[in-house]
Image (cartoon, rainbow, N blue to C red):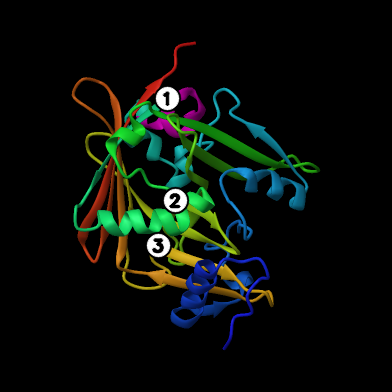
Amino acid sequence: MPLREYPSQPLQDWLSQRWVMLCGRQIDPADFPWLMGPFGEVDVIGDAHIDRLARDENLRVERNSEGVGLLDSVNDLAQDGSLEQRLAQPVTDFYEQTADYDLEVWSEWNPVFKPFGSLIQRIYSRRLQQLNLPQRPFDTSRGISSEIAKLYDTKSGSLRYTFWNRRLKSSGAAIYSGNYSAGELPDGRRCMKVVFPLPRGNATVVMSVEAEEDGALTLVSEGRRFGDPGFYFLLRDSRGRHWTQYIRSMRERITVYVDDEGVLRANHALTLWRFPVMRLHYKMTRRSK
């Protein structure tokens, strides 16, 4: 079944979308509300897509307001609403007041996968300004900027999207722009869902939630089949049809914790076929008022 390409679309985007159609499945968005999220356009993603989304859906944008976070409450991630009681207070504060924190990050690549990561960056990430993973520790030596953008319905005032935008301070290049929300899987489990807009689609990471005994929060995108936590590509073709592919081989684990010196940190590990691809290590510091 052919995919009718968009007139101005680069060949590499067309090929990746074709791959999703051939290896994935066609879906009706109404049947998969747990999976759906904002899509990008065919040009640069960066964070410009936020203004486009606000215009198209009649939304009001508020950027980096003091005290706002990725979640209104961490309890949204738990079925019984008791997650906050099991987490260290700094972990809870970070998710509920993310805009008040400065971030430092160090990248650590597996030498086997680093050339592949560099290739993806040259072909896609730099141009799209999305999923632009740091290739060298020096890239993040001056730190990264962090912005929370909330999008509200102009009529009802209800929150529609929460985007977290991160850029390299050294170059201004975008690293990520993702929409964060608490969700629910088909089996009823609560989850964290992160949607990264891409040309005519998105990459969606669905993560299960675990509270550790030491108060750390662990998010895991790992499953066996469609409908489980994991990594999904979604696509809307030129006929308005929706397609998705579940990438079982790609897995992530993020642990946010307080170290022995009282410093808030996070470790982010990405694996492919269970082989380590890269690790990101974060230090989060609350700004003084």
- The answer to whether residue 216 is seen in the rendering is no
Q: Residue at x 63, y 70 (%)?
A: 30
Q: Residue at x 40, y 31 (%)?
A: 92
Residue 180 in the image, given as x and y percentages of width and height: 51, 46
Residue pointed to by mark 3: 231
- Residue tagged by mark 2? 131
Q: Which mark is residue 102?
A: 1
Of residues 36 and 273, the one nearer the viewer is 273
Q: Amino acid at mark 3?
A: Phe
Tell me the kind of residue under disc 1: Asp
What segment is highlighted magenta in the picture? Answer: 91-101
Q: CA distance from mark 2 to mark 1?
A: 20 Å
Mark in front: 2 vs 3? 2
Mark 2 or 1: the one toward you = 2
Is residue 219 among the parts visible in the rendering?
Answer: yes
The N terminus, quarter of image: bottom right
